[in-house]
Structures are given as C-alpha cells and as structure tokens.
C-alpha cells in the first residue's frame, strides 16, 4: 500500500470511529499526544543514531490561530478533574485503531507522524477556541472536507 493510500485509510478510519463514538476534543487530544510522543521518540533516536535531521513540519506541532489577545482567554480548570472524567475505554479504542492501522498499512514513521500532526492541529485549534472547561468535552468538530 502506498503512503498516500495508507494516510487515506488512517484518515477514513479515524473520522468514522471518532464520529461513531462522538469523541470529545480532550480525549482525541490525549490519544494523539500519546501516539505522536511515542513516534517522535523513535524518530529522534533514529535521527541521532544516523546523524539525520528532523524536518520542522514533522518535529513540531503545526501552527494554529491564536485567540484574540484582548479577550480573556485564560480558562482555569483542574487538570486532574478533567483526567478523571475522560472515558478511558473510548480512548483505548481510538488508540488501538491508530496503532493497528499504522502497522497494517506499513506506513513509515514520518508519514504516520504527519498524518497525526494534521489531526493534532485541528484538535489544538478547537482546544484554544474553547470558552470554558465544558467545551473540552464537546464532540470534536470535523470540517466538511475532513
């Protein structure tokens, strides 16, 4: 399977599962963070062993639009409380789907990270746009073309 076919497969599966489970933004964010961190650790280790460099598009989160600074965008909430509310089973299902799809499609590490970075950018934008802690648990809003 080509990298582009693998990326489409991952995208379709994630869209379907996230929609079916009506997953909140915060849960998707936590799963993505877990996978990207693990994949980046492997890529960083490989790059340091081979003397390679990691492209910024792969190595760092993609930019998002910051909220209007004139608006008080500081939202106070208890992270521990948020972590107690998340549905661990739902997050495990998404995590398993991502892992299995990456293995099944034999997607290379860089393409896998890039595929997840686009999701990360979408989720981070929705998190920064949240007006209160309750919006962290709103279902992720997937654009039409997604």
Image (cartoon, helix red, strand yellow):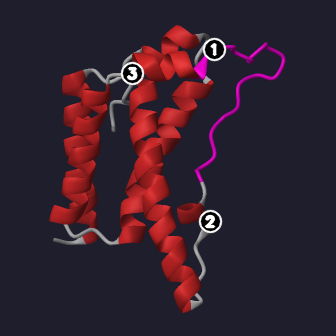
Tag 2–tag 1 contact (CB < 8 Å): no
User: Which residue is depicted at the point 47% across and 51% down?
Assistant: 117
The residue at the point 52 percent across, 42 percent down is 121
Query: In this rendering, would 13 be left or right of 79?
Result: left
The residue shown at (48%, 43%) is 120
Mark 2 to mark 3 CA distance (whole Å): 31 Å
Q: Which secondary structure class fits the magenta region best?
A: loop
Sequence-wise, the earlier of marks 1 and 3 is 1
Q: Mark number for residue 77?
A: 1
Residue lying furthest right in this view?
70
Image position, residue 81 (x, y; %) = 52, 15
**Distance of mark 2 from mark 1, alpha carbons?**
31 Å
Q: Is residue 115 magenta?
A: no
Dot 3, how many residues are within 10 Å of its Cα: few (below 14), some (14-19), or many (20+)? some
Residue 84: % across, % down: 44, 19
Percent across and percent down for residue 79 are 58, 22
- According to the image, label 2 marks what residue? 56
Name the residue beneath numbered marker 3. 86
Looking at the rendered image, the quarter that the C terminus falls into is top left
């Amino acid at each position: 399977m080509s990298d582009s076919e693998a990326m489409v497969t991952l995208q379709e599966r994630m869209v379907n599962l996230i929609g079916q489970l009506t997953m909140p933004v915060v849960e998707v964010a936590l799963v993505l963070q877990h996978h990207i961190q693990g994949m980046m650790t492997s890529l960083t280790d490989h790059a340091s062993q081979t003397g390679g460099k990691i492209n910024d598009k792969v190595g760092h989160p993609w930019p998002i639009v910051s909220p209007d600074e004139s608006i008080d965008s500081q939202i106070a909430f208890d992270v521990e409380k948020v972590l107690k509310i998340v549905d661990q089973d739902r997050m495990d299902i998404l995590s398993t789907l991502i892992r299995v799809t990456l293995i099944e499609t034999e997607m290379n590490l860089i393409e896998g990270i890039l595929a997840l970075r686009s999701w990360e950018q979408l989720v981070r934008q929705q998190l920064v746009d949240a007006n209160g802690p309750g919006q962290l648990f709103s279902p992720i809003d997937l654009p039409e073309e997604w």
